[in-house]
Image (cartoon, rainbow, N blue to C red):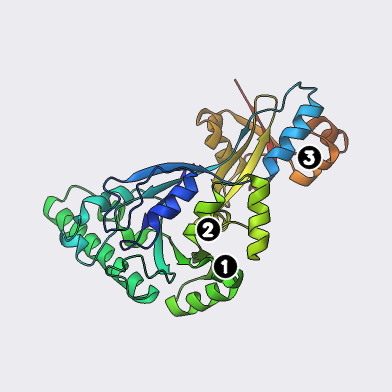
Amino acid sequence: MSLSVGIVGLPNVGKSTLFNALLKKQQAYVANFPFATIEPNIGIVPVPDERLSKLAEVTKKSESMSNLPPEVPATVEFVDIAGLIAGASKGEGLGNKFLSHIRETSAICYVLRAFTDPDIIKQGVKNPKTDLEVLKLELDLADAETIENHKKKKEQDPENLPLFSKKPFLIVLNVDEADLKNSGSLEDKYVEELGVDKNQVVIISARTEAELSELSPEDQKAYLADLGVEKSGLERLIQKAFATLGLITFLTAGEKEVRAWTIPAGISAQEAAGVIHTDFIKKFIKADVVAFTDFVTLGGWKAARDAGKVRSEGRDYIMKDGEVVEFKIGA
């Protein structure tokens, strides 16, 4: 399954800067005036997963390959739209034209300004709590309009309407770089202030993320260490998106590729097989499952089987995060 996140915020809060950093290239136009983003920008971002490189190394050795198999990470689709302002649902600013672009996303990511750059225009921005209320109000008003239009047309079951109020959401607080070392306490502060769950709040410096995106992985780690943080904002954002949406990943490893697959927590092995190919659901026979640590420590499928660490599970087996799986499929 795909995970898509719509990035929403008032003008000049750092949405496009964050988006550019996520994609590691300038796909969105960043400028210091409202509505710099005229058309929605959509980007597919790989989910950082160090397990894949370990799987590739083990697979190369165990299968006597001359090269490492390709790594295919799970992905997140980010949709960046123009900055909303109060009255957007009624056509103010660029209006509700852009709201349609986030109706089909899995979750909404509200980006709120918490940095102190006096050179960046603060049009419509007051404080994180008030700004969040403005954004939510605009989406609620847009929902009300959708419901009203539905009542007039009576074309669709109201329970299936793509309402914003039904979507899980995350909150990104865009802070100064110096605040990153206190991200834990800041998250606690905003969790209480905004009245949300801790998994919904992420402290990020969009400017720092932009600088990190230009560095090699080794230099990124050194930069983060200097800032007193362990993981980039991207990693923490994706982790919390997975937690908020109740998603996990399972892994597959073979000569063709090593890959991470995104699934909802609590689904069965048979349903998980269908994520790879829908035909696998009806042709499912069994799933060979091994813990990631056993697979890597022992050195691949054959060694794990010889050590008795591979389990054969039936269609109703509930998948766990990080398991390495090989599905047996009938003709």
Give the mark nearest the N terminus, 1 or 3. 1
In the visual, does 86 lie left or right of 51?
left
Give the mark nearest the N terminus, 3 or 2. 2
Which of the two residues, 219 or 110, is positioned nearer the viewer here? 219
- What residue do we see at 57% from left, 58% from top? 236
Q: CA distance from mark 3 to mark 2?
A: 36 Å
Is residue 291 something one can see in this rendering? no
Q: Residues within 10 Å of mark 2 (few under 14, many from 20)?
A: many
In the visual, does 209 lie left or right of 68?
left
Under circle 1, the secondary element is: helix
Under circle 3, the secondary element is: helix
Under circle 2, the secondary element is: helix
Q: Which residue is mark 1?
A: 180
Residue 142 image position (x, y, % from top left): 23, 60
Q: Residues within 10 Å of mark 3 (few under 14, many from 20)?
A: many
Q: Amino acid at mark 1?
A: Leu
Q: Is residue 88 above or below residue 48?
A: below
Q: CA distance from mark 1 to mark 3?
A: 36 Å
Which of the two residues, 61 or 324, is positioned nearer the viewer here? 61
Determine whether label 2 and label 1 are within 8 Å by CB: yes
Task: Name the mark nearer the viewer: 3 or 2.
Answer: 2
Q: Which residue is mark 3?
A: 295
Q: Which residue is mark 2?
A: 208
- What residue do we see at 35% from left, 65% from top? 120
Q: Amino acid at mark 3?
A: Phe
- What residue do we see at 68% from left, 47% from top? 218
Q: Which image quadrant is residue 139 in? A: bottom left
Residue 73 image position (x, y, % from top left): 59, 39
In the visual, does 254 lie left or right of 83?
right
Which of the two residues, 84 or 148, is positioned nearer the viewer here? 84
Residue 282 image position (x, y, % from top left): 54, 30
